[in-house]
Amino acid sequence: MSKQTFIQGAFILIIAGLITKILGFVNKIVMARILGPEGIGLYMMAVPILILVITLTRLGLPVAISKLVAEADATGDKKRIKRILVVSLAVTGTLSILFTIMTLLGAKVLSSIFLTDPRAYYPLVAITPIVPIVAVSSVIKGYFQGKQNMKPSAYSQVIEQIVRISLVAFLANLLLPYGLEYAAAGAMISVVIGEGAALLYLFTTFKFRNSKGFRVRRGFFAQLQKGRQTLRELLRIGLPTTGSGLIGSLSWTFEAIIVAQSLALAGVATSVATAQYGLLSGYAIPLVMLPMFITYSLSVSLVPAISEAAAQHNEAMIHRRIYQAIRIALIFGAPSTVIMFVFAEPLTTVVYDAPDAGKFLKILAPFFLLLYFQGPLQAVLQGLDKANIAMVNSLIGAIVKTVSIFFLASQPQFGIYGAAMAINIGVCLVTLLHFFSIVKLVGFSFHLWDFVKVGAAMFGMAYAGIYTMQRLVGVYGLELLWALLLTVSLSLLLYFILLILLKMIGRQDIARVPVIGPIIGPMFPKR
């Protein structure tokens, strides 16, 4: 088994996340060109139901499996690892079959009444077979993540996107003559086949890596009968994790309703309110959420790393892992914040042709820096077997955010900007609650000097970016797209040079980057 360090595992997932983000963006462009707005609408109608069904099927078990496997691996308990897999496969397999049947039987009602468009029936039925595939994949991914081998998860993400992109144009065009609903169903089928290809890779890798270990099928039912305690352990971690996810999903759902009602109280016309909320939630928020694949990668790697250290009662290692995660989130989140804030209007103009969305991006960007810490901090709580605390923190944040939206957005002087400020309040509150919960549990304290160094680099990056953009557009008359790309590239280069000069990044950091790190690491100074 190829086990990586926490940093190596995180970087592998970050690189895979970047590749899948790019491929996913290409996939969206292809679908948009074939299906058009109406077809994309039918496609997207099925997605929320799918996400809800998958969330309920998985029950937060990937995180629980990762944590428990890491603990068992730390003590060399192979029997416990096998029992974790057996129980997890039994639970997710049963639930996936149950929810798949329920979704298929209820597809007509869901599409006609709840989705208000009977044509959504076809993409909904087409995507339903993905549920058992994702259920089994999540168990295998959780196992590999628990063994701190992030390569299978990373490779499977890339395989899934490549297969999907290869098939989406063919299947959508093939079915387009029969109607948009069939074309949208064809796009959904490409998603199912992509996930199936990823599962095939994961299953093959599992059999190959585990050829000299244990056989899951051997004594499956005997292990299942002994797995009551294992089931309790899985659910103790998994259910609060699922709760946190559901709280987030329901919070965003209610947010749209509360914003609409609040803006009505503020005297904003319905059509204007819808357009304003679209600029906030459809344009600005997706942009500030873009770097989240980095913190997601950190979170996935962090759960087993913290669990292993906790199982060995190694408090120093727990502190080290938390410090490393916060440091990486800070280094990558800071330039993202500068780019979103300084270049807000050019970004929304180039990406969406909607410069007005830049106002919301400027409000969100400074506070969303804290959001980049939120995922890793939640992963620490899960690794410490305190997923219930993370769920309570998320619930408190969701309630405060919802109440704040109502009070602020309903004020005529704030309007939709009050909703943006309320979202910032929710982000800050949950992140701080997670941080103080960890401080209470393990007594962790962050390195203030690191924040000062990164702050200085951010200031230098921002100043250089503003100056360069003004010169390129105002003096040389360069087209906005190319001016933005050149300015962002130069600003990022300056940012990382400043981090090296300030000894925030050094030889030992670069050396940990997979593949190229050991080669280029010696070229950098020590920190």
Image (spheres, helix red, strand yellow):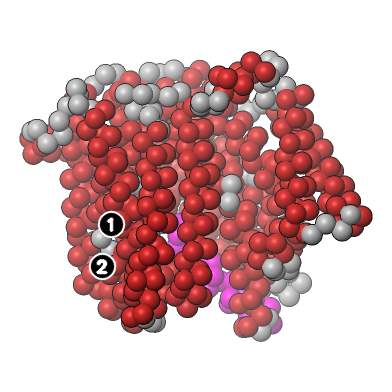
Q: Is residue 481 above or below residue 497?
A: below
Looking at numbered disc 2 in the image, what kind of residue is underneath it? Answer: Thr
Residue lying furthest right: 475
Q: Quadrant of the N terminus?
A: top left
The residue where tag 1 is placed is 131
* Distance from the alpha carbon under mark 1 to that under mark 2: 10 Å
Quarter assignment of residue 185: bottom left
Q: Which residues are magenta?
A: 246-267
Q: Are marks 1 and 2 in contact (CB under 8 Å)?
A: yes
Question: What is the magenta segment's predominant secondary structure?
Answer: helix
Residue 336 coordinates in the image, percent (x, y): 67, 45
Looking at numbered disc 1 in the image, what kind of residue is underneath it? Answer: Val
Residue at image position (45%, 62%) is 250
Residue at image position (66%, 61%) is 351
Quarter assignment of residue 190: bottom left
Q: Is residue 111 visible?
A: no
In the image, residue 396 lies in the stretch drawn in magenta: no
Whichever of labels 1 and 2 marks the residue nearer the N terminus, that label is 2
Q: Quadrant of the C terminus?
A: top right
In the image, residue 253 lies in the stretch drawn in magenta: yes
Residue 508 coordinates in the image, percent (x, y): 60, 18
Residue at image position (85%, 43%) is 463
The residue where tag 2 is placed is 103
Nearer to the camera, 176 or 434: 176
Nearer to the camera, 217 or 440: 217
Q: Is residue 405 above or below residue 327?
A: below
User: How many numbered marks, from 0 up?
Assistant: 2
In terms of secondary structure, where does tag 2 sit?
helix
Quarter assignment of residue 150: top left
Residue 521 coordinates in the image, percent (x, y): 62, 19
Nearer to the camera, 333 or 388: 333
